[in-house]
Image (cartoon, rainbow, N blue to C red):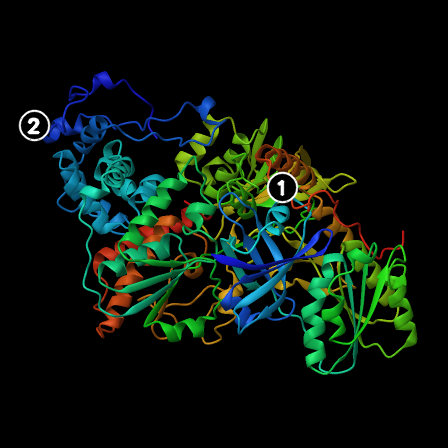
């Protein structure tokens, strides 16, 4: 996130209220002279007390100006850097030319959930990270532009054509309605498949609705993206827990192919004494109560504790979501406890920056030893040990090493554990022929197919806790594989070089993410 | 949507709802539960499946009105519907095929005991069921349980059946000998008392826990209980555990987490009902049934 700067300095400034202005072609030098646009945001002090979206979105004027900064590289690295391979230069060019219809169609063709990715992608590790302009200064604000075009599309859906391809008579089941499942559904329905998504919760969206908070990704926006898929013909069966309501083999018989995208839903706890005291939440539980169940809203029947002094353990996006949520629910002191230092935080840079702006405290180089409680077993604090950074470990990050005799206590009336998630055995337990690795994640081949023919898998249940966009990439690739499998075109043609590069970018992002939701 | 077909009051604050849920009716087993979500803004709450009819595509839920969410549910009448019913969840009860089992039900826990007693009876196990309530009107499901074997009904005030707590009746049944296994479901203090009673003889005792839960699939970890010194999730590892291994004190503590919220929600609800001047079903005037069967 760049610092805000006065708009007056911009070289092109159309009069407000004008119809889309098509600026005259600029020379490369002129384009290089435009400074990166700053995303307008809600004031930090004000937003820390409400659940409205932090980022306000670009105006048309700012979006078209930022689009001018794209150099239209002959070899666009940004596409390779995108796990769903969005044709970024194409939609940016159409936006720059003021043809928002075409820009929206272009974007929606590549990405089933652009309103989501425009908000939650770690662009700095992906498209923007490899943008040529980042080499000499600031990358094009691709995420902000994607969000602008996607929001425009959502507001003008009735003006955009809805493709109704000829049904091909083949039925595909998708298990899980998170980012991987929704993306696969969008891809498959476009090709004429009869797609049914099975969702365990009462509402679709997976981590997009139970995990990521309203202030980062409004639930109406997720709902509208899902509605668009339903309008295209995707069927959603809620309250269907695969492994309980139906077994996997049972479902396999009813469908021509399947895609498993159930995520890595089980919370990991610290395994320290006192962890079951009242007032200790997993991030999953805390965020689900607040987001999916709407406990931030007084009208909701679902209770959630409103901690005054809140400690959130962890340094990923989920930890940032939890700590910023607690601030909005009235915490006077909300603290991140993380065992490494600022530089190793796996969360997106923007989330950390926003948290800092909102007055979140960071206790770095501290690892929990024990949760403290009173006679009634309510949390009263957390005892931690000071760490120092040693040699890099397997993840490439410097390993935290305990400092003897450095224990200290932090007062807290609520503790949220956000140190990761693991696989849920509920589904795999009912499918003995489905190969899983020792950690319970599903094993797939290079095409995303599991050990069960015609059954594919992707997202966190294959790769372990990662990001929304990586899950979407898996959804898109698996949909292509399912299409190839059902057309009898198997094995599909070898993956294009693009996918390899995207794969490498994905691997980097996985290493950087460390934690889900984002 | 899951239409309500029948609403039947079993005791002053316990109601049986029969509703459509064909898939769950088809595959449910004793010990399993569902998560019920009445509609937008409602809480998700776990309820044990008390009975079912696969042919009719219906299940029964026996609900004790203890808070706003349960008070809303017990008011549902034929013609109303529940938006979401997810399940069946949890592991089915591990049941023996022979011998003599004692089933102990306290309060609404009697509804959880019913499908267990029915299945034991079907398998040819001799079943003695001990159920209890504060007074006669709090004793539920006696006829259904009588179809599975001997029933000993107890009331605290002696107004019906055997005077005293269920644990006292259990002590006598155990003393008479020949018991192979005990199943106990009810308020936490009752289950703890039963487990302590059977522990010296090493009599296998299964209890069914009903901790705070959101998703019911292992995702939230809210239902974690300590069993044999290890953290387990009641939703996926249970809800039934070996009563001798459960940390009942922790369970009881964790169950009190939202008590202040529940009181506030009930007050809000009473206020809203007053505003609507809707005739009240009477479910909320009664306090939750006190822990039954516990030696004071």
Q: Mark 2: which secondary structure?
A: loop
Give the percent coordinates (x, y) of residue A188: 27, 61
Few, some or many residues within 10 Å of mark 2 (<14, 14–19, 20+): few
Mark 1 is surrounded, within 10 Å at the Cα level, by few (under 14), some (14 to 19) or many (20 or more) other residues, namely few
Q: Nearer the viewer, mark 1 or mark 2?
A: 1
Residue B172: percent from left, percent from top: 91, 69
Return the x and y of residue A444 as percentages of the image width and height: 38, 67
Name the residue that disc number 2 marks: A24
- Residue B279, disc: 1
Using residue B75 as the reference point, say whether residue A75 is left or right of it: left
A425 relative to A453, above or below: above
For the C terminus of chain A, the quadrant is top left
In this rendering, the count of numbered labels is 2
Front residue of A282 and B183: B183
Closer to the camera, A362 or A287?
A287
Per the image, label 1 sits on a secondary structure element best described as loop
């Amino acid at each position: 996130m760049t610092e805000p700067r006065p708009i007056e300095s911009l070289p092109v400034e159309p009069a407000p209220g004008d119809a889309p202005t098509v600026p005259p072609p600029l020379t490369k030098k002129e384009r290089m002279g435009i400074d990166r646009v700053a995303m307008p945001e809600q004031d930090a002090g004000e937003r820390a007390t409400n659940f409205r979206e932090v980022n306000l979105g670009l105006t048309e004027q700012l979006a078209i100006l930022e689009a001018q900064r794209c150099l239209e590289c002959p070899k666009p690295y940004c596409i390779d850097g995108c796990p769903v391979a969005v044709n970024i230069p194409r939609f940016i060019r159409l936006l720059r030319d003021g043809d928002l219809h075409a820009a929206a169609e272009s974007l929606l063709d590549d990405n089933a959930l652009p309103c989501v990715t425009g908000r939650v992608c770690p662009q700095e590790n992906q498209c923007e990270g490899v943008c040529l302009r980042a080499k000499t200064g600031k990358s094009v604000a691709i995420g902000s532009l994607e969000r602008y075009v996607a929001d425009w599309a959502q507001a003008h859906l009735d003006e955009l054509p809805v493709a109704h391809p000829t049904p091909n008579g083949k039925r595909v089941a998708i298990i899980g309605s998170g980012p991987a499942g929704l993306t696969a559904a969008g891809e498959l329905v476009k090709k004429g498949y009869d797609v049914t998504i099975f969702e365990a919760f009462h509402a679709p969206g997976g981590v997009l609705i139970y995990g990521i908070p309203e202030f980062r990704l409004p639930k109406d926006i997720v709902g509208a993206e899902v509605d668009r898929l339903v309008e295209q013909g995707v069927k959603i069966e809620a309250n269907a827990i695969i492994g309980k309501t139906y077994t996997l083999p049972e479902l396999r018989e009813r469908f021509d192919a399947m895609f498993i995208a159930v995520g890595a839903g089980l919370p990991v706890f610290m395994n320290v004494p006192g962890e079951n005291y009242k007032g200790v939440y997993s991030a999953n539980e805390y965020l689900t109560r607040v987001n999916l169940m709407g406990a931030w809203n007084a009208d909701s029947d679902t209770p959630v504790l409103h901690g005054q002094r809140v400690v959130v353990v962890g340094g990923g996006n989920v930890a940032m979501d939890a700590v910023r949520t607690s601030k909005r629910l009235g915490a006077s002191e909300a603290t991140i406890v993380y065992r490494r230092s600022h530089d190793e935080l796996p969360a997106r840079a923007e989330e950390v920056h926003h948290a800092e702006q909102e007055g979140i405290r960071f206790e770095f180089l501290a690892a929990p030893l024990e949760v403290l409680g009173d006679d009634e077993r309510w949390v009263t604090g957390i005892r931690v040990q000071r760490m120092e950074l040693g040699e890099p470990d397997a993840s490439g990050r410097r390993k935290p090493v305990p400092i003897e005799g450095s224990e200290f206590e932090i007062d807290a009336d609520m503790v949220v554990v956000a140190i990761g998630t693991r696989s849920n055995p509920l589904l795999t337990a009912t499918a003995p022929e489905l190969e899983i690795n020792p950690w319970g994640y599903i094993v797939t081949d290079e095409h995303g197919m599991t050990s069960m023919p015609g059954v594919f898998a992707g997202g966190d249940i294959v790769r372990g806790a990662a990001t929304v966009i990586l899950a979407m990439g898996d959804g898109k690739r698996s949909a292509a594989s399912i299409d190839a499998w059902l057309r009898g075109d198997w094995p599909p043609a070898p993956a294009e070089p693009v996918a390899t590069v995207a794969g490498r970018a994905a691997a980097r992002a996985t290493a950087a993410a460390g934690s889900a939701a984002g | 949507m899951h239409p309500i077909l029948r609403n039947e009051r079993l005791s002053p604050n316990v109601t049986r709802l029969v509703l459509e849920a064909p898939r769950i009716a088809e595959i449910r087993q004793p010990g399993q539960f569902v998560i019920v979500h009445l509609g937008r803004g409602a809480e998700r709450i776990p309820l044990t499946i008390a009975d079912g009819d696969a042919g009719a595509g219906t299940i029964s839920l026996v609900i004790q009105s203890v808070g706003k969410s349960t008070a809303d549910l017990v008011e549902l009448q034929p013609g109303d519907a529940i938006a979401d019913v997810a399940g069946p969840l949890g592991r089915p009860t591990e049941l023996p095929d022979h011998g003599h089992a004692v089933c102990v039900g306290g309060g609404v826990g009697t509804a959880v005991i019913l499908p267990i007693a029915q299945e034991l009876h079907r398998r040819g196990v001799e079943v003695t069921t001990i159920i209890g309530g504060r007074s006669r009107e709090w004793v539920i499901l006696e006829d259904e349980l009588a179809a599975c074997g001997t029933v000993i009904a107890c009331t605290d005030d002696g107004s019906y059946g055997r005077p005293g707590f269920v644990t006292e009746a259990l002590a006598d049944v155990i003393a008479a000998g020949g018991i192979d296994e005990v199943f106990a479901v009810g308020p936490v203090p009752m289950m703890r008392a039963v487990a302590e009673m059977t522990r010296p003889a090493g009599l296998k005792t299964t209890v069914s826990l009903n901790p705070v839960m959101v998703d019911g699939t292992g995702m939230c970890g809210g239902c974690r209980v300590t069993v044999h010194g290890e953290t387990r999730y009641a939703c996926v590892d249970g809800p039934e555990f070996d009563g001798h291994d459960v940390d009942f004190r922790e369970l009881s503590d964790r169950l009190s987490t939202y008590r202040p919220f529940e009181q506030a929600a009930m007050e809000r609800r009473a206020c809203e009902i007053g505003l609507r001047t809707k005739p009240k079903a009477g479910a909320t005037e009664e306090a939750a049934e006190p822990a039954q069967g516990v030696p004071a």
